Amino acid sequence: MQAYIELQGKQFKVEKGSELEAPRVNLAEGDTLTIDKVLAWESDGKNKFGTPYIKNAKVTCKVLSHTRSKKMLGAKFKRRKGYTKIMGSRTLYSILQVESIDV
């Protein structure tokens, strides 16, 4: 059984027991997150699509941990001026484990 969900503007394909790296959610580790924005559902050749979401469908996830990505570098420079600036950022993520998919 697979489901396609939307979480904070991003779409994910999830299965029961799988882990996903999603944008940071404001919950403590070990808390449960219920996602009701299910876009599509697929199981044994049967498909169900929402317009845009499937009514009364939800995916329950458990927050395992919070982490940060590797540093991404960006640079600015102006030619012939000797100006260079390098900036870095690390995106905040949460690791979620899918516990159940209810359709």
Image: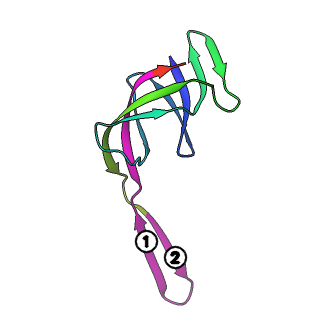
Image coordinates for residue 9, horizontal then vertical, percent:
57, 46
Image quadrant of residue 27? top left
Image quadrant where residue 88 sits: bottom left
The residue at 54%/32% (across/down) is 36
- Quadrant position of residue 63: top left
Quadrant in which the C terminus appears:
top right
Give x and y (percent) for residue 73.
43, 65
- Residue 84 forms part of the magenta stretch: yes
Mark 1 element type: strand
Q: Amino acid at mark 1?
A: Met
- Residue drawn 43% across the image and 71% down it: 87
Where does the image place residue 28, in percent across and percent down from the top left? Answer: 30, 44
Q: Which residue is mark 1?
A: 87
Q: How is the image coloured?
A: rainbow
- Is 30 covered by the magenta stretch? no
Tell me residue 86's x, y (percent).
Answer: 43, 74
Amino acid type assigned to the residue bearing label 2 in the image? Lys
> Is residue 95 rendered to the left or right of residue 84?
left
Give SS at disc 2: strand
Can you identify the residue that label 2 sits on? 76
Q: Is residue 88 above or below residue 54?
A: below
Q: Which mark is residue 20?
A: none
Magenta part of the chain = 73-100
Kindly indicate whether the residue at mark 2 contacts the one at mark 1 (C-beta within 8 angstroms).
yes
In-image side of 8 versus 64 (left or right): right
At x 52%, y 21%, the residue is: 2
